[in-house]
Amino acid sequence: MLRTLFSGISGMRAHQTMLDVTGNNIANVNTSGFKASQTQFTDTLSQMLTQTGAPATGRGGTNPAQVGLGVQVSAITTNFSTGARQTTGRATDMMINGDGFFVVENGGQQYYTRAGAFDFDANGNLVSADGSYVMGWGAQNGVVNTNGVLAPLQLPTTTLSGARATTSMSFDGNLPADAEAGTVLDRDVEVYDTLGNARVVTLTFTKSTDAGSTGQNWTVSAQDPNLANPATTTLTFDTNGALTTPGALNVNGIDINLGQISGFAEINSLAIAQKNGQQAGTLQSFAISNDGTIMGAFSNGVKEQIGRIATANFDNPSGLEKVGGSLFNASVNSGEAQIGVAGDGGRGTLVGGALEMSNVDLSQEFTNLIVAQRGFQANSRIITTSDEVLQELVNLKR
């Protein structure tokens, strides 16, 4: 039989595979996070008709004479370039701007995906469209340990921001140097105990020297309703309005820093600058930053971390295996997953409220359709021509 018959068959098979790959790309033109594939061909083993000959005395060398035996598909590679951004406005929709994959878990098996259409289930778990858990790190007291073990991210509506006792506060601003002796300024500060119960600590500033004196003194009294006696100290300012005493006191375990107060004339701007402690609060809303941090806004006015989304990268992403559902699985040629935070270690940043569209280029795919179709037709003509040649051979018998 003619070799051209088998060459034509191999060409038809290879171009049929190219058509299959191209058709799948076009079918997924609107699949979020889909990555297009490309078909690569290579020739098969060539039959040696004449061996090469080395140059000899009085004679030159000869080149080999080989006849190819057809074509085969050498690889179907995945194009991992980032697709276009599609803004959705949904807080749980995310896309990765750059390299990397979301880490999800289904049935105890870890997978990787570029499709960031996530949502919460009835238990508050952040899940993908097929119910796979989105993996990351939860927060403990507003702190996320990214060196910990990956776990499904959970954000139930019952999430609380725990109460914290007030242990420190500080004041800044100015005490008027021209105030008369006996002038009293009161500042009330709301503080909390370990259960979040609120109480008011009153700081009373009393001028103890006359206006115009060399330097000035203010007596400070801090009264906690849980204590019978107030804590007191004296603030002394020099003629330049600078504080010359330590400017600190402690009332019922609360450190009060007064070291930033100045003492110039005609300005009364004394105010609380900072304090810690809070009541317990319930989760009201959340937002996701570009490094995957989930920030919760609570009813007590506190904003703190409640979790962080993990992302993964691979030495050879093209070695990943597609397992359906827009999911990939690690293989022996992809390398181990390098899991970390977005925007670090070569992993792209996250964009909230948006999805990554398919990176399929329709103009290129339709061109590939034409190329594959013509290639298939050309190889079918090889078979037709070979058949005609065989027919001529048969007709020699007549």
Image (tube, rainbow, N blue to C red):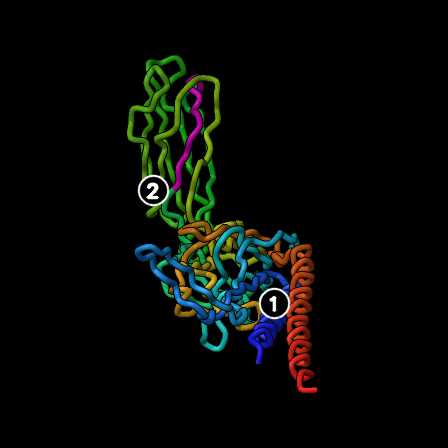
Viewer can see residue 298: no
Q: Is residue 370 left or right of residue 53?
A: right
Residue tagged by mark 1?
18
Does residue 271 sit above or below 58 in this rendering? above
Residue 305 at x, y = what percent?
Answer: 47, 54
Q: Residues within 10 Å of mark 2 (few under 14, many from 20)?
A: some
Quarter of the picture containing the N terminus is bottom right
Are discs 1 and 2 less than 8 Å apart at CB? no
Residue 171 counted in the magenta span: yes
Q: Which residue in the rendered view is the most extreme toward the bottom?
A: 398
Q: Is residue 8 left or right of residue 260?
A: right
Q: Of the residues shown, which amino acid type is indicated by label 2?
A: Asp
Give me the residue at 34% from left, 47% from top: 252
Q: Considering depth in this image, is 186 or 42 the residue closer to the camera?
A: 42
Query: Which range of residues does the magenta coloring cover?
Result: 169-179
Q: Which residue in the rendered view is the most extreme toward the front?
A: 58
Q: Residues within 10 Å of mark 1 (few under 14, many from 20)?
A: many
Does residue 152 sit above or below 79 in this rendering? below
Q: Considering depth in this image, is 265 or 14 the residue closer to the camera?
A: 14
Viewer can see residue 361: yes
Give me the residue at 37% from left, 57% from top: 61
Give me the residue at 51% from left, 68% from top: 68
Residue 353 at x, y = what percent?
Answer: 61, 54
Q: Mark 1 against mark 2, which lies toward the viewer?
A: 1
Residue tagged by mark 2?
255
Secondary structure type for disc 1: helix
Residue 82 at x, y = what percent?
Answer: 56, 53
Residue 87 at x, y = what percent?
Answer: 65, 52
